[in-house]
């Protein structure tokens, strides 16, 4: 990967240029807009056309039957089922800690105030499936939704030319998905946002995907809620001279292999480590089955930055705001409060990123493209909404009536003031 060694100011400028490339984004946005409009107008027929065009599959039916799901579960290797169940246990125990409670406050005489938290009624979860299958992303999407209490979890995933992926269907059964439709890309997002003859319209769409999926979610936001922009994977590693080059390289490649647009970044204060990691990546990438994808990500999106010291490394990484951040430094946990922007953080030499992809328990559906500045990991809160309520007795209202009517008249809203005063008119 390209190594850049410069002052912090220059490196910050480079990061801004690299992470704000618009050329590619414009082309994707245009084609996604067309796909969404076509699906909104032509429903299932448009979906089937796109599935032929992009995934090379002729679809008769879009929905997967319960019998197909049960059969897939029976076909799946017990070792895979056991691993999925272990992941499920850890994801469940972690996400149960996120549950928030409703509250009621009755401290003021005659006034009751509160906030009621309810699950969303129907959500659509996107499970990627273009160049790899993602059973783990089903668990990450669906377990928090079910903990929240969502009744209708609708899963969409691209169809495959060689039939449905059996581990994906098995994971859907383990996670408790309610309905599955084989549709992918922007057309899947459009179908969940607008509804078609077969696919129900949902209240919110969650889940990761490639640039087409992430862009489509952005475009349908408002018609439907979305969780975040969870696009092509990213890994930032901050490492010093104590890190092992072959391990740093392996971790960077673990995310590079997701997508040609994935982004592996190393920031270090040690030029020798930078050279060694670069050489290791060149060696290791040739040994990977997904070499072509990982190499493209390294060439197009990846870089190694050499900074003056570790404080500068954190400043630069906070500007990148990576989806995943590994801190490969001694006493890594002591750096936690230097991290402002990252989707998920992996502390220490053994916390290799894939531990979080599969089993640790925190969610692996995470913000990308610099959006970790303001988005959070997917969680139980994403599947719940809040409604607030108040109740006043007449005498409690009387005490505050003057303040209400004063504020209403300051805003020129006479009807508001009279609504309050009508409670005290003598008739
Ligand atoms: N950020 C996260 O939390 C997270 C988690 C897991 C995976 N991911 C990312 O998910 C992505 C998975 O990507 P994938 O491609 O394997 O599967 P995907 O399901 O996201 O995308 C496949 C779909 O893309 C559409 N598509 C492909 N080329 C197109 C084109 N030229 N025009 C219009 N549509 C087109 C097709 O409809 C296809 O069904 C990767 O980028 C990976 O890094 C991100
Ligand atoms: N690293 C991905 C999130 O960017 C999640 C994943 C699923 N399977 C393997 N990895
Ligand atoms: Zn991964």
Image: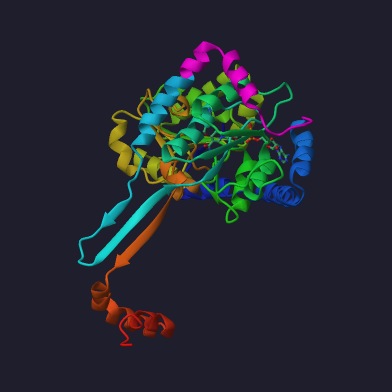
Residue ID at (30%, 87%): 426
Q: Please state the horizontal and vertical placement of residue 377, each as a whole percent of the image.
A: 44, 41
> Which sits in the foreground, 8 or 233?
233
Residue ID at (74%, 24%): 161
> Which sits in the foreground, 27 or 16?
27
Residue ID at (36%, 83%): 422
Q: Is residue 115 visible?
A: yes
Q: Is residue 286 visible?
A: no
Quarter where residue 318 is shown: top left
Q: Please state the horizontal and vertical placement of residue 125, each as a whole percent of the image.
A: 56, 38
Q: Please state the horizontal and vertical placement of residue 114, each as a whole percent of the image.
A: 31, 58
Q: Which residues are magenta?
A: 57-83
Of all residues, the one furthest to the front in this rendering is 427
The answer to if 273 sits in the magenta stretch is no
Q: Quadrant of the N terminus?
A: top right
> In which of the image's four quarters is ligand 1 placed?
top right
């Amino acid at each position: 990967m390209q190594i850049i060694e410069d002052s912090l100011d220059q490196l910050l400028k480079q990061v801004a240029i690299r992470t704000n490339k618009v050329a590619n984004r414009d082309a994707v946005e245009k084609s996604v807009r067309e796909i969404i409009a076509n699906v909104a107008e032509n429903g299932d027929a448009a979906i089937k056309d796109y599935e032929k065009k992009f995934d090379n599959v002729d679809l008769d039916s879009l929905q997967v039957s319960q019998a197909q799901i049960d059969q897939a579960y029976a076909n799946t290797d017990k070792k895979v089922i056991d691993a999925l169940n272990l992941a499920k246990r850890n994801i469940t125990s972690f996400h149960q800690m996120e549950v928030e409670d409703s509250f009621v406050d009755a401290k003021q005489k005659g006034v009751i105030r509160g906030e009621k938290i309810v699950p969303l009624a129907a959500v659509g979860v996107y499970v990627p499936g273009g160049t790899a299958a993602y059973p783990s992303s089903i668990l990450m999407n669906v377990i928090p939704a079910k903990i929240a209490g969502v009744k209708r979890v609708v899963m969409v995933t691209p169809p495959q030319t060689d039939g449905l992926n059996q581990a994906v269907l098995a994971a859907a059964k383990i996670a408790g998905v309610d309905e599955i439709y084989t549709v992918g890309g922007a057309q899947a997002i459009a179908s969940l946002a607008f509804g078609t003859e077969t696919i129900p319209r949902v209240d919110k769409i969650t889940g990761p995907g490639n640039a087409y999926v992430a862009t489509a979610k952005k475009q349908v936001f408002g018609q439907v809620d979305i969780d975040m922009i969870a696009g092509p994977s990213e890994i930032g590693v901050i490492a010093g001279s104590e890190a092992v080059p072959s391990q740093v390289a392996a971790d960077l490649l673990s995310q590079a292999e997701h997508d040609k647009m994935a982004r592996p970044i190393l920031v270090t204060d040690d030029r020798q480590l930078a050279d060694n990691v670069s050489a290791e990546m060149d060696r290791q990438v040739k040994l990977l089955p997904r070499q072509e994808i990982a190499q493209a990500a390294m060439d197009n999106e990846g870089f190694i930055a050499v900074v003056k010291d570790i404080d500068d490394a954190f400043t630069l990484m906070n500007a990148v705001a990576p989806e995943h951040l590994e801190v490969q430094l001694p006493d890594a946990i002591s750096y936690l409060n230097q991290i402002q922007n990252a989707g998920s953080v992996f502390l220490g030499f053994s916390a290799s990123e894939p531990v979080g992809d599969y089993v640790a328990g925190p969610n692996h559906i995470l913000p990308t493209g610099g959006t970790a500045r303001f988005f959070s990991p997917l969680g139980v809160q994403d599947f719940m909404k809040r409604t607030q309520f108040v109740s006043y007795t007449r005498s409690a209202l009387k005490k505050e009536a003057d303040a209400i009517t004063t504020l209403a008249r300051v805003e020129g809203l006479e009807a508001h003031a009279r609504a309050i005063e009508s409670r005290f008119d003598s008739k």
